[in-house]
Structure formats: structure tokens, C-alpha cells
Image (spheres, grey):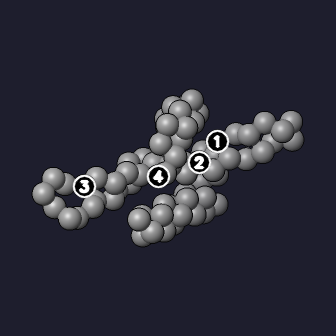
Amino acid sequence: MQFWDENPVLQSYLSDPDFCIVATLKEQNHNERVEGFVFGTTIKKPRSSWKYRYLVWLGCANDCQGLGLASQIYQTMHELFGQE
């Protein structure tokens, strides 16, 4: 069962790519298929020097579950949050 559609994932990536990671698989017919994604964001509170970073959404295709893909894209997001 899949609770997400590729179109909103790709639209989010195109509109705000800084904290959006999309893992794709190139198929034999040279098409790319979305296998997993993670969206994050950063907010800054008014009158505060703190920035808050949080993960908004993480998804992984059923056939990729248990292979470590979600862990890899989560780790990449964690590293991106640390760079800002």
C-alpha cells in the first residue's frame, strides 16, 4: 500500500529543493521512479536567534522497505540540517 503520490513529491522538490531529498531508481527503460523521499524545513522564531529544523515527511516505497533506504535519506537530511 502506498500513501503518497509521485507528483506531489516531485512538485515539492522542484519548489523547495533545499530540504527535500528524493531517492530515485533508474529503470531499464531509462525512466526514473521515486523510491523514497524526505522533506524538512527550518523556521526562525520572531525575536529569537534560534532556528528550528524538523523533518516534515519521510516516505519509502514498499519494495524498498527493510533495505536501509529510509535510514540513508534520513541521515542525509540530518547532515543537511547540521550544515545550515
Q: Is residue 28 above or below residue 44?
A: above
Which residue appears at 60% of the width and 58% of the height?
A: 69
For the C terminus, the image quarter is: bottom left
Q: Are marks 2 and 1 in contact (CB under 8 Å)?
A: yes
In terms of depth relative to the viewer, which is nearer, 25 or 49?
49
SS assignment at label 3: strand
Q: Secondary structure at mark 2?
A: strand
The residue tagged 1 is: 34
Q: Does label 2 or label 3 sit earlier along the sequence?
A: 2
Which residue occupies the foreground of this view, 57 or 46? Answer: 46
Q: Amino acid at mark 3?
A: Lys
Q: Residues within 10 Å of mark 2 (few under 14, many from 20)?
A: many
Q: Which of pointers 4 and 2 indicates the residue nearer the eye?
A: 4
Question: Which amino acid type corresponds to the residue marked 4 in the rendered image?
Answer: Phe
Count residues near mark 4 (Cα–Cα under 10 Å), then give few for <14, some for 14-19, many for 20+. many
Q: Nearer the viewer, mark 3 or mark 1?
A: 3
Q: Residue 44, which numbered label?
A: 3
Q: Amino acid at mark 1?
A: Val
The numbered mark at residue 22 is 2
Q: Secondary structure at mark 1?
A: strand
Q: Position of residue 21 (x, y in %)?
A: 55, 51
Does residue 13 appear left or right of residue 28 in this picture?
left
Q: Position of residue 19 (x, y in %)?
A: 47, 52
Mark 3 and mark 1 lie on one chain; the one further toward the N terminus is 1
Q: Residue 28 in the image: state x and y as whole percent.
A: 87, 41
Q: Residues within 10 Å of mark 1 (few under 14, many from 20)?
A: some
User: How far, Cα to Cα, is label 4 from label 2?
Assistant: 10 Å
Q: Label 2 near label 4: C-beta < 8 Å?
A: no
Label 1 – label 4 distance at C-alpha: 17 Å
